[in-house]
């Protein structure tokens, strides 16, 4: 794998625009695969709270909708954006729907899984709302399970902000 940091990747915004992740250089990133019809979907509220609390200190939350787990993100870009805005008042960046596992996994997620394997060394993303905390230099600090609530990441965020 030739990528060394998340800044080596590009993504597509929910509206389809190309986004060079290098634009987030020097920020602490919280990258999460999301879904609108999941038991963990209420975590959008906590993710937004994290974003509002820390964005002025250089923290960005980047959400990547994914429909690979129980078909829990069936909508198109417009319905995802409407849902996230209307129900959870999401203001952090939402990206185009991607695969996080399998032959068509987004290259960013291939990198994240390799850099921070899950439980027992498993590379696969197990479910929606798996979270990755990224250092200011673009390297992976830690991977968090779907059931880990966003507010439980505050200590890690503070640690990375102090680096």
Image: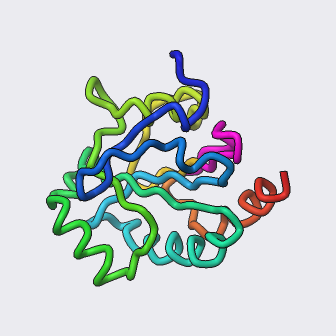
In the picture, measured across the screen, residue 126 lies left or right of residue 78, that is right
**74 versus 8 height, above or below:** below
Q: Quadrant of residue 72?
A: bottom left
Residue ID at (29%, 43%): 98
Indicate the position of residue 36 as horizontal and vertical percent values: 28, 66
Residue ID at (67%, 62%): 58
**42 versus 19 height, above or below:** below
Q: Looking at this view, is 21 or 142 the one in front? A: 21
Q: Which residues are magenta?
A: 133-145
Q: Quadrant of residue 14?
A: bottom left
Residue at the far top in the pictured view: 1
Residue ID at (66%, 72%): 56
Indicate the position of residue 57 as horizontal and vertical percent values: 71, 68
In the picture, measured across the screen, residue 77 lies left or right of residue 139, that is left
**23 versus 58 height, above or below:** above
In the picture, measured across the screen, residue 144 lies left or right of residue 9, that is right
**12 versus 83 height, above or below:** above
The answer to if 135 sits in the magenta stretch is yes
């Amino acid at each position: 794998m030739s990528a060394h940091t998340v800044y080596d990747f590009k993504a597509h915004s929910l509206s389809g625009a190309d986004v060079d992740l290098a634009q987030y250089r020097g920020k602490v990133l919280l990258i999460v695969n999301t879904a609108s019809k999941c038991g963990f979907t209420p975590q959008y509220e906590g993710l937004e709270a994290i974003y509002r609390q820390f964005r002025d200190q250089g923290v960005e939350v980047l959400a990547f909708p994914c429909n690979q787990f129980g078909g829990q993100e069936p909508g198109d870009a417009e319905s995802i954006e409407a849902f996230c805005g209307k129900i959870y008042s999401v203001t952090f960046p939402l990206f185009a729907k991607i695969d996080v596992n399998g032959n068509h996994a987004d290259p960013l997620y291939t990198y994240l899984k390799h850099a921070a394997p899950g439980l027992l060394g498993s590379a696969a993303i197990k479910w929606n709302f798996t979270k990755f905390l990224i250092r200011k230099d673009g390297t992976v600090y830690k991977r968090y399970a779907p059931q880990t609530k966003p507010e439980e990441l505050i200590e890690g965020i503070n640690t990375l902000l102090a680096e």
